[in-house]
Amino acid sequence: MDDRGPRVVIVGGGFGGLAAAKALGKTPARVLLIDRTNHHLFQPLLYQVATAVLATGQIASPIREILRKQRNATVVLGEVTGVDVNQQSVIVNSADREDVPVPYDYLVLATGAGHSYFGHDEYEKFAPGLKSLADAVAARNKILQAFEQAEAEEDPSRHRDLLTFVLVGAGATGVEMAGALAGLVRSTLRSEYRRIDPSAARIILVDLGNRVLGTFADDLSRAAKERLERLGVEVRLGHGVDQIDAEGVTVAGERIASKTVIWTAGVAPSPAGKWLKGETDRAGRVRVQTDLTVAGHPEIFVVGDTASLDQDGKPLAGVAQVAMQQGRYAGRLIHRRVTGQSAPGPFRYFDKGNMAVVGKGFAVLQSGKVHVSGLLAWLAWAAVHLEFVGQSGLRISVFLQWVWTYLTGQRGSRLIVNHHASTNDDARTPSAPERQPAGTR
Ligand SMILES: Cc1cc2nc3c(=O)[nH]c(=O)nc-3n(C[C@H](O)[C@H](O)[C@H](O)COP(=O)(O)OP(=O)(O)OC[C@H]3O[C@@H](n4cnc5c(N)ncnc54)[C@H](O)[C@@H]3O)c2cc1C
């Protein structure tokens, strides 16, 4: 790598960080991308790994493979634990070294978000969330294991608890997961067991709000709920969970026995706000200016889920498009500064619309005044996700798997794989991630 030019350190190889790195492709600078995993993860398809449609390698790619042709970019596997804004360095732990200062001239923080249990961190061990590949594999193990346990259980009175699946949170992740789970139990697994009837499994989706897909328009939210109910999902709205433990959940005073509870509710930003000791919003996301820098630090950019920026009086959502557009903007702005060009206008998010899938062949799509639900929306969803899934090789394999699953009901990855390492870490460095403040996505 060239040892001249300013040092641009990017923390996070998710949607925001990767977009920033790519936008710096022709910049005379030394770009260093640090991530605690070795892969870029396509989070919107995590639920398909959790429900055995896709394998882990179909929704993630090694970051260094994605950036292999970008000669000015170096990728390092390490966990950032802090930022020294006065010394202009980030503090990094790697496999065999701790607290290594890595200097920067420009810094882009794109560290995303984790789970939030809204002050009930004790729920985490009973209701794991869905944020990393390891989370998705753990959820898949749990779901498939429940059927194995029920088949092995001679006392039929125990089958009901084992085959009751509760999803807490009816946003896009909860709805997509519920639809895919319904397909798994009613179609894929239907004829494979002898002592149990997988199609009799209960899938319960719980949310405090009065609508599923709360960020979508009313008509689409209603269409999604009706579709879920047609798929046999019990949708319980207007009441959150009062309690989660090893034996199940309590909702509105009712006890629901379940061995498989999955948290699809809140997210909390990464600790970037604590590292910078700057202004954050109530959820803990770093407040950025309209050029995505932190006040008083024109050399520090924060993008994606861990940044907080209002547009037209409303905070921008924690979605992939926002992260990608912000990352690209930050990269281009740094390029212009490094090459002595004038600064661009302020960042403005261009909203291309929102989509969510509700089981086989059905999605809802909202783009401005256009509201579509059904097969057409599902086809649009499939096309957009294939375009963004990453490498072209993955695109082909995901497409073929979807066609196969659509036609036969069979899924691509129904293996129960219990890794020896902690299920909370995918190839992460040894240090534990910091506790994060509560907030919502
Ligand atoms: C299950 C699920 C479904 C979703 N579905 C959709 C959807 O359908 N449509 C949509 O638009 N959005 C969806 N989202 C949201 C979308 O994925 C996020 O908005 C987007 O990933 C944010 O991008 P980011 O770059 O800010 O963070 P991320 O993509 O999360 O990337 C953050 C990166 O930073 C790394 N990192 C974090 N901390 C450190 C550290 N201390 N040191 C080093 N590296 C670190 C992580 O390993 C990760 O690679 C979904 C999210 C989830 C979890």
Image (cartoon, rainbow, N blue to C red):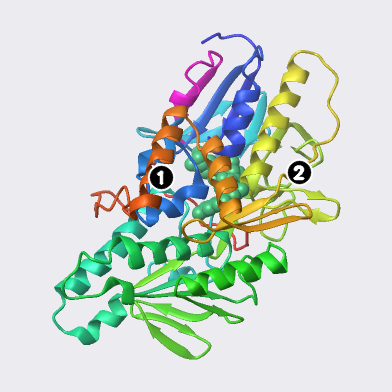
Query: Picture coordinates of residue 303 (x, y %)?
Result: 67, 40
Q: Which of pointers 2 and 1 indicates the residue nearer the eye? A: 1
Q: Secondary structure at mark 2?
A: loop
Q: Amino acid at mark 2?
A: Val
Q: Amino acid at mark 1?
A: Val
- The outermost residue toward the bottom is 253
Q: What's drawn in magenta, residue-wise?
A: 64-78
Q: Is residue 111 visible?
A: no
Residue closer to the observer: 155 or 99? 155
- In space, the residues marked 2 and 1 are separated at their CA atoms by 43 Å
Q: Is residue 72 magenta?
A: yes
* Mark carried by residue 288: 2
Mark 1 is surrounded, within 10 Å at the Cα level, by few (under 14), some (14 to 19) or many (20 or more) other residues, namely: few
Q: Quadrant of the C terminus?
A: bottom right
Q: Residue at x 55, y 24 (%)?
A: 32
Q: Is residue 339 magenta?
A: no
Query: Picture coordinates of residue 238 (x, y %)?
Result: 61, 81
